[in-house]
Amino acid sequence: MDRDDFIYAAGYYPLMHDKEDWDRDLKLMKESGINMIRTAELFNTWDRIEPEKDKFNFEFLDEFFDLCLKYDIKILLGTGTASPPYWLHELYPDVNILNNHGEQYPNNVSYTWACIDNPGYISEVERYLTVLIDRYKDHEALYAYQIHNEVSFPFMPLKEGDIDIYCYCNHTKKNFRKWIENKYETLDNLNYAYRWGATNTCHTSWEQVEPPRTKPTSWSSVTRWLDFRLFWMDNFVKFISWQNDIIKKYDTKHLTTTNIFFLKSQDPLGVLTALDQFEMAKVVDMIGYDLYPGSGNKLEKKPEFSSMFLDMAKSTSKPLGKNYWLLETESGPINGWVLGPSRNVKGFDLIRNVFEAVGHDAKLTLYQGWREWDFQPLHWGAIVDLDGGITERTVAAKKIGTVLNEYGKSFVKANNNKGEIGILISKENAIVLNGMGQEDFLIKALRGAYTTFWEKGYNVEFVNEDLVKDGYVNKYPVLYMPFMSVVDDELAKGLDKYVYQGGTLIATARCGMLGQYGWYNHKIPCFGLSDVFGVEATEVEAGSNPNVSYDMKTYTGYWHKEVLQINDKNVGILARFNDDKPAVTINNYGKGQAVYFATHPDVAYLEEKSYLLWDIIDDILLTKGLSPKISVDYTNRSVKEIDVHYLGNEKEEYLIITNYVNKKHSGFFINGEKYVRISMKTNRQYYKAIDIMTEETIDIQKDEDCILLEIKIIKDQVKIIRLT
């Protein structure tokens, strides 16, 4: 397998199956187009390879490596550090992570139970990794290393209720104190930042610093909570970077990756699990993500979910000039134990999920896993049945493999079109709102903003504070800030520069209410942003859905209604509340524009289907000459049922068309089909459009700088149109 091949992979764990099945299973995988297997990252890993200290059992893995070589299937080898052996706990009794109630996470429950701050764990990891790398670095079947597995804290609580907060062991406390001392430098600075009127600890030594055991909702300090979660985000990034350095010390030929996630229902923005995806992407060769749209049947509840997740994933690797991998996706019926599954994942789900990822620029997709195992009847999904026999999903997987085998090199060389809309997300904003118990509102604002642009056909990417400060965001004509309540002075200056140089910035109510330390800023919008927007919010009402009048139509806002003071005579009032006070303003600033909503139109769109944001965006962006590269039109539209993605390179272009038709929308297809009209801006001359899934030829019409296609969409079918 070459580096420019698309990687079509599956998880497989030899010790979970009879040895006589290995050859048959690999043969079927090879016939289905699978060219890489992930193993030993979580199952059949360190705990099985070294069940006793210094007594290794590599024989099964050696044999499996050789068998994969026989079938010319590469291996993604896990470092296994998420599942250390039990003797680690016996040798270092304090190695288990400790929650905020003083309880150790048990060994025999889930992975990631050992604290990465424990010196004994770190020492044993380095020793084990050195042995593992030395054994397999020269094996021809090895393709890459996966570091750890979903590095984070467990998202399963030990008791009913919220997920637990970690870690409070003495080793973590010691490292946290070092981090705090490095950040604040002096105790005077620390005491200034940590002053808290209800219970004010005046630290007289660094040893008195304790991580907070409660959130600000318990009247704990906002600043302490912010620091502790930032510390853990840094800590996990350093841990993965440290493993990467060990691997590169002994093996510079093979790639490294790690798998993480976004939008987990228990912790959507990674605050409690301590994930900083943008920083994590920097410390491995390829960042990987785990996406399970069938878990909880998200596709029925949140049609934008997969697209939003994959755009977030792509957005962490793209600024680094890297690709990303989809390191886990479901392979069959998923979750629910005996009362499950959450979704009866079928072959058409696999086809849609894989090509949705391809359409979002992923260069690897991996089924977790190829076969299920008898001893964990959760519904984990599988391409084959429990005996390894062929299912309708196997047929679908082979169909996918056939397409990827023929066109995979083209997909690897092709990319999405340039991002038109940037959505700003901030770990500080997420941490503070999580601590205040208001993260759910932020998630709704993010979803509402993304869904609006996604349904209109714009190519959306996500950016963080650093990408604003270093000027990367200048590439986006529009930057949107959903519920950005935490803004510091440096970020405000970066946003000022973005608008002054020609960008369009859109913000919503409570913009920059909080700043450094999570404290109040003294005006909203904060710092120089009040000049950028030309307004200041002097009062606010909360808890209602205010009526907004725009272009002689009435819309619904959401939750906040700010009273805006106009500070610049050039500020235009686009929309008004029903009391005639400004609801939406626009200000020309430098070469750009700044639009301010005194309410939350993104949440209003998601919750109330209010089109205020939708219609104002139309007017603002079209006057700037900004419209989507691809427009899709069809009848009987409810939400965005048809999703079209562009992939292109210098030689050819593709349109990947997936459909997400909610079961409730039973009248969408007529006799199982729907005609869709697609318009794509292009300066190229095309003569032929072929659906590579069916070999069907599609007529191309030309209209000035666009091509027009009318395509028949079949229920539960993916179409991949190759333009030549």
Image: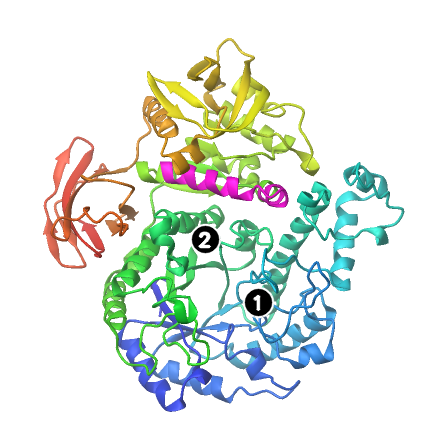
The answer to whether any part of residue 706 appears in the image is: yes
Q: How many marks?
A: 2
On the image, numbered disc 2 is attached to which residue?
322
* Residue type, numbered disc 1: Lys
**For the stretch drawn in magenta, what is the main secondary structure?**
helix
- Against 329, residue 532 (above or below) is above
Q: Is residue 207 shown left or right of residue 310?
A: right
Local SS, label 1: helix
* Residue in the image at 41% along x and 31% along y: 477
- x, y percent for residue 310: 40, 51
Q: Which residues are magenta?
A: 430-452
Query: Residue 248 — which label?
Result: 1
Taking the view exactly as shown, the residue that stands out farthest to the bottom is 20
* Residue in the image at 63% along x and 63% along y: 242
From the viewer's perspective, is the residue at label 2 or at label 1 nearer?
A: 2
Question: In which quadrant of the rendered view does residue 524 lie?
Answer: top right
* Residue type, numbered disc 2: Lys
- x, y percent for residue 23: 34, 86
Q: Is residue 488 shown left or right of residue 8?
A: right
